[in-house]
């Protein structure tokens, strides 16, 4: 049975040693390198030639994402599973772009870590449940309801003019209605959008435009 060589890159001594012990106790796996920094790992990774690297995202010095990029550029067959203590959206997605093969929380129990290694070796992309949910939420369409959709066609026209900086008089002239009618529509707009001023109403327009 082939022994899978694994490198651990983690600056917390207790976590690093704990994962190393898990690997050495598991038939078929061997901790072939244990490093507290990305710099040390990069100096030794080619001579060790591991199959898998378990790497902390938030390393001091060269962080885990930059180490990941360098490993993938020079050793494309190496599988890299990122370790994190928190579900950080930006770091997770930066890791995806850099080529990470999976993600685990450091608090995951030993059986879950071994299952993840087996998974990644079989072509899977293991993720802790919390991280998987973050990934899904990131790519799921924003379902926040656009409150401006409850406005009438005329109210939307007036709100659009407000957003473009037109005065009440200019709006009335452009839409061929009286200033009193404009004020009446504005009152309805404020009530429907639950705002109290032109500034708040316009802010909602720009907010929902960003979500589209």
Image (cartoon, helix red, strand yellow):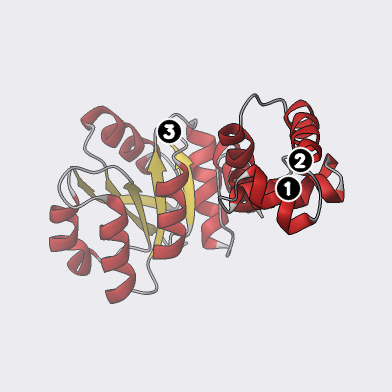
Residue 130: image quadrant is: top right
Q: Single out the mark in the foreground, 1 or 3.
A: 1
Cβ–Cβ below 8 Å for labels 2 and 1?
Answer: yes
Rendered residue at 21%/38% (across/down): 11
For residue 17, which quarter of the picture? top left
Q: Nearest to the eye among marks 2 and 1: give it.
A: 2
Nearest the viewer among 104 and 121 is 104
State the image coordinates of residue 31 (x, y, percent, origin top left). Answer: 30, 48
Secondary structure under tag 3 reads: loop
Q: Which residue is mark 1?
A: 158
Q: Which residue is found at the position 39% from the left and 43% from the top?
A: 83
Badge 1 local density, few (<14 within 10 Å), some, or many (20+)?
many
Q: Which residue is mark 2?
A: 182
* In this view, 178 is above or below 212: above
**Is 108 situated above or below 117?**
above
On the rendered structure, is 187 left or right of 202? right
Give the vertical position of 39 relative to 184 (above or below): below
Q: Residues within 10 Å of mark 2 (few under 14, many from 20)?
A: some
3D distance between C-alphas at marks 3 and 2: 51 Å
Mark 3 lies on residue: 86
Q: Secondary structure at mark 1?
A: helix
């Amino acid at each position: 049975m082939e022994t899978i060589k694994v490198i651990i890159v983690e600056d917390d001594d207790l976590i690093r040693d704990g994962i190393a012990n898990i690997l050495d106790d598991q038939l078929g796996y061997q901790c072939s390198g244990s490093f507290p920094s990305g710099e040390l790992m990069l100096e030794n990774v080619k001579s060790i030639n591991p199959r898998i690297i378990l790497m902390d995202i938030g390393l001091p010095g060269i962080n885990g994402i930059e180490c990941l990029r360098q490993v993938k550029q020079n050793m494309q067959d190496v599988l890299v599973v990122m370790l994190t203590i928190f579900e950080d959206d930006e770091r997770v997605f930066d890791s995806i772009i850099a080529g990470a093969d999976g993600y685990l929380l450091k608090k995951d129990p030993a059986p879950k870590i071994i299952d993840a290694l087996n998974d990644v070796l079989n072509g899977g992309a293991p993720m802790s449940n919390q991280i998987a949910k973050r990934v899904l939420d990131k790519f799921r369409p924003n379902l926040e309801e656009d409150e401006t959709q409850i406005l009438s066609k005329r109210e939307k026209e007036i709100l659009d003019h407000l957003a473009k900086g037109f005065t009440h008089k200019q709006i009335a002239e452009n839409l061929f209605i009286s200033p009193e009618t404009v004020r009446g529509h504005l009152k309805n707009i404020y009530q429907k959008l639950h705002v109290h001023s032109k500034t708040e109403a316009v802010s909602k327009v720009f907010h929902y435009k960003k979500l589209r």
